[in-house]
Amino acid sequence: MKLLITGVAGFIGYHTAKKALELGHEVVGIDNLNSYYQVSLKEDRLKQLGISHKSSQSTIHEKLSFYKIDIANDLAMDQLFNKEKFDAVIHLAAQAGVRYSIESPRTYINSNAEGFLNVLEGCRTTQVKHLIYASSSSVYGNNNNTPFKTTDPVDHPVSLYAATKRANELMAHTYSHLYKLPTTGLRFFTVYGPWGRPDMAPFLFTEAILQGKPIKVFNNGDMERDFTFVDDIVEAQLKLLDHIPQSDPANQNDNPNTSSAPFKIFNIGNSSPVNLMKFIETIEKYTESKAVKNYMPMQPGDVSKTYADVEDLFEMINFRPKVDLEKGINEFVEWFKSYYK
């Protein structure tokens, strides 16, 4: 297929593009290379893909094209879709981070709402066959029913980031209903791995532990996360490309994850939540260093536990995450030590 991957210089976007190219797809990647975290890391990911990024010029390398584009730029997005004529879109570009959404809310509306609208419009006007987009486990808010199921109500987000991701799901459904645009939303659960984001716990903990600096342990360590290795996320996304949602007039829209429109939502998580203290111990094991812990209260917008039910995803593509925490953390720490020498 000819794929558009938005956020291609990002953590998941880079890994998705790398695997898609290995599978023979033609990839067009876009990213605005913003400074939410170090731009050099994003540029180094692009270099791994064979792109030598220079200013705003587009660069072509074998089956990969790159454009420096902000998804919130409606004119640039219109021109891109009309020029390239994609078979499918994997939309991963977004303003990430729960805590940052408390500090800079307008950034999230600009990227996650307006930017997503531009993606939907591009798919609609050029008749893209399948849009896969990143949602988030944060849409579940403080859901007390575990594991989290896509049939659970998700009407009480506790951060603006979560609200924008839920808004994406509703916007996607509207376009699926009105224009028969097939859309698949993926609720990611705490993704980690090599080339990971510097604002995420694996990166922050590993960096601090190796430097002998204190780490912030929120909610006094009483937290659980369904840590999901990035390779598992990528495999599921690319397997879903061929599983295009179909309209089903008999569907009564009883569940929020299905519809009479060509619309689906899946969880992608390891389905095995890990206590935060166990997570820190695993990093200590592979860094061969002890953490200095600074215990902190729960932060605004955070949730105490995430836990994914992935049975419907297994039924659709016969897939379950395979990488356990020990292997995943070992690979991340080895990458970190190599990259930062």
Image: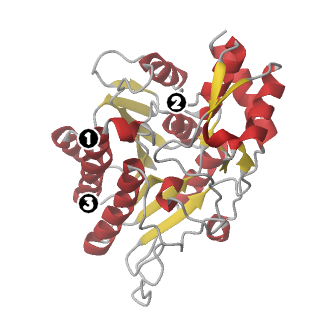
For disc 3, the marked residue is 124
Which residue is at a point 35% across and 68% down the rendered structure image?
173
Whether residue 194 is visible? no
What type is the residue that disc 3 sits on? Arg
Which residue occupies the extreme top position in the image?
Answer: 341
For disc 1, the marked residue is 106
- The nearer-to-camera label among 1 and 3 is 1
The tag earlier along the polypeptide, 3 or 2, is 3
Which residue is at a point 27% across and 46% down the rendered structure image?
109
Is 5 above or below relative to 257?
above
Is 38 above or below relative to 315?
above
From mark 2 to mark 1, how far is it between C-alphas?
Answer: 19 Å
- The nearer-to-camera label among 3 and 2 is 2
Q: Name the image quarter holding the C terminus.
A: top right
From mark 1 to mark 3, how far is it between C-alphas?
Answer: 26 Å
What type is the residue that disc 1 sits on? Arg
Which residue is at a point 70% across and 29% down the rendered structure image?
332
Classify 10 Å Cα crowding around label 2: few (below 14), some (14-19), many (20 and above): some
Q: Is residue 327 left or right of residue 301?
A: right
